Structures are given as structure tokens and as C-alpha cells.
């Protein structure tokens, strides 16, 4: 990994309500808290975080498509779209870099419909159930993935 690598961290519907929406499930951290956590973890790793949230499936897809131009990786907490959006999955599958799926709660300890993830079909890995700490874990995992990709590039180049 040379220089600063840009990583897109996408957050889907209702994540703008963190801190007040079902804190017994999602914790008391706000989305701004999670952004600070991700950016603080990223800096010493040479990553630059572009942190975004949208309630719009269309906007999330557009951001994934635009990421092809200048992002090294994507971390996505697609919220409820995780379980419903083939369109987001298709956009992620077209992204050339690593994708990590992220969830604050452990979906397998929740309703059965949350056990299905279309995002997983495009993701290198999943981090879920660690609450706010998941954002820091995802940044560290992405740094390792990108470091590995850079190492592979040097071996093959």
C-alpha cells in the first residue's frame, strides 16, 4: 500500500438515526461518532475515509459506481437494503477492489429475514455484532486487504 488509499464507508437507511433508534440493539453511538472512530483508526494505517449515509438505494448505488474511479475499497453497512437489494449487490460486484460488509448487530441473533444478505455475495468478509467497534475493525481489516493486494501486485508486476 503506497501513499494514502481512499476507502468509501457507506451507511444505508436509518443509520442517520443512530443514538436514538433502538439503542438496545444499535447502541448509543451516533453516526458522527462512528465516522470519527473510522477516521481515527484509518489515519495511522494510511487510509483516507470518505464516510457517507443515505436512505436512498439509488444514491448508494451511484456512490458505489462512482467509487470505481478513485476508491481502493468499500466498507458498507447497507442497513435493511442488505436483505433486499439485488441492485446494490450488482453494483458492488462490479467494483474492482475489496468490499467488506458491516453491521452493528449480529443479524443471526435477530429475525429470520435478516439472515439473508445480498451484500455478502459481493463481500470479501463480514464484520457484525461488535457495535460501534465494528467500524474500527472494518478499517483495520480493509487495511490488511489492501496491503495484501499491494503485495500481490509487486509479486506479479
Image (tube, rainbow, N blue to C red):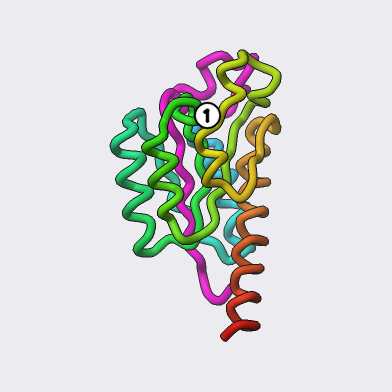
155 left or right of 89? right
Quarter where residue 152 is shown: bottom right
Snapshot quadrant of residue 143: bottom right
Where is residue 4? Give x, y as percent.
Answer: 51, 69
Which quadrant would the C terminus be assigned to in this image? bottom right
Vertical position of residue 22 compared to residue 122: above or below: above
65 or 8: nearer the viewer: 65
The residue range painted magenta reads: 1-30
Q: Residue under circle 1?
A: 30
**Residue 96 higher or lower than 115, as above or below:** below
Q: Is residue 97 above or below residue 25?
A: below
Q: Position of residue 121 (x, y in %)?
A: 54, 42
Residue 21 colored in magenta in the image: yes
x then y, percent, for residue 31: 49, 33
Drawn side of residue 120 relative to residue 14, left or right: right
Q: Is residue 13 magenta?
A: yes
Residue at image coords 37%, 60%: 68
> Measured from the top left, where is residue 34 in percent x and y?
55, 38
Label 1: which secondary element = loop
Q: Residue at x 36, y 33 (%)?
A: 54
Residue under the point 58% across and 28% down = 29
Amino acid at each position: 500500500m503506497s501513499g494514502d488509499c481512499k476507502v468509501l464507508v457507506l451507511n444505508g437507511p436509518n443509520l442517520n438515526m443512530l443514538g436514538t433508534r433502538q439503542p438496545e440493539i444499535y447502541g448509543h453511538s451516533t453516526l458522527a461518532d462512528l465516522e470519527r472512530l473510522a477516521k481515527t483508526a484509518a489515519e495511522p494505517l494510511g487510509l483516507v475515509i470518505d464516510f457517507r449515509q443515505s436512505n436512498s438505494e439509488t444514491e448508494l448505488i451511484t456512490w458505489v459506481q462512482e467509487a470505481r474511479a478513485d476508491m481502493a475499497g468499500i466498507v458498507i453497512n447497507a442497513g435493511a437494503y442488505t436483505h433486499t437489494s439485488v441492485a446494490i449487490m450488482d453494483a458492488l460486484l462490479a467494483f474492482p477492489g475489496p468490499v467488506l460488509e458491516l453491521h452493528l448487530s449480529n443479524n443471526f441473533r435477530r429475525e429470520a429475514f435478516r439472515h439473508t444478505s445480498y451484500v455478502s455475495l459481493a463481500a470479501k468478509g463480514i464484520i457484525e455484532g461488535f457495535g460501534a467497534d465494528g467500524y474500527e475493525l472494518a478499517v483495520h481489516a480493509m487495511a490488511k486487504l489492501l496491503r495484501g493486494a499491494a503485495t500481490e501486485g509487486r509479486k506479479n508486476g
